[in-house]
Amino acid sequence: MQIIILARFFGYFDDKYKKGTGIVFSKGSNGNGLSGVAEVLSFASTGNAIPVLHEIRHALVELLGNGTASTIDLGAIPFAAGDERFLDDVLGKGEVTATLNVMGTSHVQETAVAGVWRVDHFNEAGETQSRFIEVTFMPEILKTQTEDAADGLEKLSARLKEEDAS
Amino acid sequence: MVDKPMLPELLKANGISRRGFLKYCASLTSLMALSPAMMPRIAHALENAPRPSVIWLSFQECTGCTEAITRSHAPTLEDLIFNAVSLDYHHTLQAASGHAAEAAREAAMKEHWGKYVLVVDGSIPVDNPGYSCIAGISNLDMLKETAEGAAAIVAVGTCAAYGGIPHADPNPTGAVSVGDIIKDKPIINVPGCPPIPVVMTGVLAHFLTFGIPELDELGRPKAFFGETIHDRCYRRPFYDKGLFAEGFDDEGAREGWCLYKLGCKGPTTRSVCATTKWNGGTSFPIQAGHPCLGCTEPDFWDNGGFYKPLSVPAGDYRKLGLAAVAAGAVAGVAGGALARSGKARAAAAHEKVDAHDLEKKS
Ligand code: SF4
Ligand code: SF4
C-alpha cells in the first residue's frame, strides 16, 4: 500500500514553513495493526527538519565568521520520528564520538558536518534529559572544568603525601 | 538561609563533578523551555542563589501531587531540584505530627518571614471550615496565616489552582482554590491531576534562578502551559485528515486514529503531556488509547462528560468556572459566595450517574 504523508501534517506550521516537502514511502505488507501504525509514525514528519538545518547552516557561518558558538535545543522543537531520521541522514556521523559518565551518560558526537555536534544527555535510568545541536569547535562539556582539575590536584597531592609518609 | 549549602556543594557532596553541574544546567534550561544561551546565567544563579525555605501545606487532596513528585525511581533532575529546596514543613512527609509539626511550621515561618515559598496542594472548604483541619486549625486559617509571610505561593495541582475534584458538582464542602482566598501575594498555578513532576520541579527551579515565571491568564507558567495537548499530539495527522476512532475497539482505535469523537479535550487543554509524557517519558493517556480529560483546566470534572466530543454543548459548568476565576480576581471575597451559589445550583440539578450511564450518554 502506498501511503503519502504530507510533511505539512500540522496545519499550524503552514504559514511559518511553506517549504515542507512531501515524504512518500511504501509500507511493507507485514505492516499491519499496531506495528503498522508505529511504522507509519516513524516516517511522519512535521516539516521542521529543513528549517533546523538552515538554522545550523547559519550558525556555522557565524562560527567561522566571528567565532560565535551556538546551541539549538532539539527539545524545544516539535519533531516527529521522520524529522529525526532526516536530520541524522543529512548530518551523518563524524570523526569524534565520546561517552560521558556523569549523572547518567551523555553522548557527544561530531557530525559529518565538522563543527556541528550532537549532545544528548541521559539520566541514570537511561531516559533522555535533553538533546542539543552545538555548533562549536569544541563542546564545553568535553573540556575539563577548572574546578574539577583543582579537585584532581588535591587528590593527587594527598596521595603523594601518603606515599611520602610510608 | 546563609548556613544552608548551595546547590553546587550539594552536587559535590553527592560526588557530582563540575561537568555534571553543567549537564544539569543544560537539561534544566531545556526543561524550563529557555534559550540554551541562558545556560551560563542559570549556572551563575544556581551557584549564588541561597536555597529558599519551603513550607508545603496539604488541604483537601488525595496526596497524588506529592506522590507524583516524590516517586521517581532513579535519582533524577526532579530529585535534585527538589532536594535543592529546604522543605521545612510538609506534614505528609515529615516525621513529626500534630502540635509538634505545627511548632516546626511556626518556627520556619518566623525564621524566614517574608522570604519562604509556600506550596499548597488541595482545595480549601469554605462552607464549613471545620470540614478539613490539621491539628485543630482549619485549612482556611492555616492558609491565611502561612500566606502572610510568604514571598510567593505555588498552587500545585488542579485542586489548589482551581478547586479541582473537591470543587466538582455538587461541591459538598464549598471548596475553593488558593487564588480565591489569597489576593495579595504572587500565586503560580501548576494545575494537573496530578501535574507532571518535571513541571512542578521546573517551576521551583525557575523560582530558584529567576523568580516568578511569566504566567498566563489562568496563573499558569507560560513555559509549560503555552501550548495545547492537541498542538503537540502525535495523533494530530489523523485529526487533520478527519480520521477518527468512533469507539474504543473499532478499526480506527486499532489504527491509532484521533480520539476527538471519543471526547478528547486535547484541543482546549494546555499541558506538556504530549511531549514530556508520563512515567519518565514512557507514554501519556492519548498514546495509551484514552482521550485527554483536560485535567489542567478549571472544572475539567464537570466539563460535560469525559466521553463527549468537545463540539457537544457542555452545560454551563465551564462558564461558571471561568466567571469565578475572573470575578475572584476583582472582588476579594467573591470566591466563597460564588462557590456557594454554584453549589446550590448544582445540588438542585444533581443527577446520579454510574459507569453504565456514562457509556450510554457518550
Ligand atoms: S487525540 Fe486529542 S489531542 Fe490528539 S489530535 Fe485528536 S483531538 Fe487532538
Ligand atoms: S493528557 Fe490531558 S488529562 Fe491526561 S494528564 Fe495530560 S492534561 Fe491531564
Image (cartoon, rainbow, N blue to C red):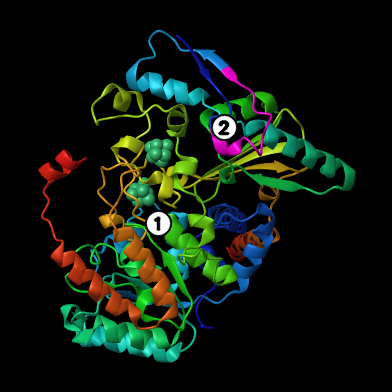
Residue B281 vs residue B215: left or right?
Answer: left
Amino acid at circle 1: Pro
Query: Is A24 included in the stretch rendered in magenta?
Result: no
User: Which residue does the image show at 33% across and 59% down from the upper left?
Assistant: B318
- Mark 2: few/some/many CA within 10 Å (<14, 14-19, 20+): many
Residue B277 visible in the current orientation: no
Q: Which residues are magenta?
A: A10-23
Q: Quadrant of residue B133?
A: bottom left
- In percent of width and height, residue A44 lies at 51, 26
Above or below: residue B135 compared with residue B227: below
| Front residue (pair B360, A23) | B360
User: Which residue does the image show at 54% across and 49% down from the upper left?
Assistant: A102
Check disc 2 and report the residue beneath it.
A46
User: Which residue does the image show at 34% across and 35% down from the upper left?
Assistant: B259
Amino acid at circle 2: Thr
Q: Are marks 2 and 1 on the same chain?
A: no
C-alpha distance separating marks 2 and 1: 27 Å
